[in-house]
Image (cartoon, rainbow, N blue to C red):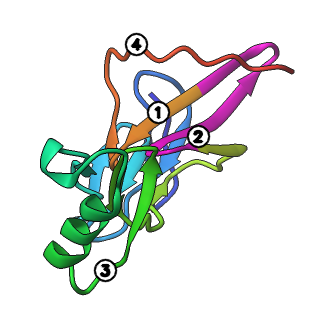
Amino acid sequence: MAACKPGYKPLGKTSNCTQKCPKGFIEQEEQCIKPNSYSRGVGYSWIPQDGPFSVVQSQLRCNKENPNTSCEQLYVNQFALKEQKIQLKLAQKIITQLQVNSLVVLVLKKYGKEIKLLLIKNNAQIQNNNYQIKLEI
């Protein structure tokens, strides 16, 4: 176990140290999550009552139920709340951040050819996921 300087804590069972989370943040392994983090919700998909080949009603439902936020089209037939930045502070430096729809991939560490990734969807870390990521280095 490492002796860490003030403001830092041991990182797992290694001899490394990582910054402690700011006051009020929730600690989850190597990340600090801000309480009451933002979520985009489940979205507003097309339903038969909307009429054929139209997403106008989906957007109207989204806007009506969320008057203080604008909606955006996610897919051909689905609207969701307009995306906001994820309120997430990592204790480690982020090497790269990729975003595809609501999935955020943070590249945290590089060990030669091995790369440590953190997957986040709707502000929650993904555990035991089925995502396949192809990295070209």
Task: Give the vertical position of 129 relative to 49 (above or below).
Answer: above
Is residue 38 at all visible to an observer of this figure?
no
Question: Identity of the amino acid at label 4?
Answer: Asn
Q: Is residue 125 left or right of residue 93?
A: left
Name the image quarter holding the C terminus.
Answer: top right
Say what secondary structure mark 2 lies in. strand
Q: What residue is at 36 percent from the left and 77 percent from the top?
A: 70
Q: Front-most of 7 and 29?
A: 29
Q: Residue at x 20, y 53 (%)?
A: 50
Q: Residues within 10 Å of mark 4 (few under 14, many from 20)?
A: few
Q: Give the mark nearest the N terminus, 3 or 1.
A: 3
- Circle 2 sits on which residue? 106
Callout 4 secondary element = loop
Residue carrying label 4: 130
Q: Amino acid at mark 2?
A: Leu
Q: Which residue is mark 1?
A: 119
**Label 2 close to label 1 by CB (< 8 Å):** yes
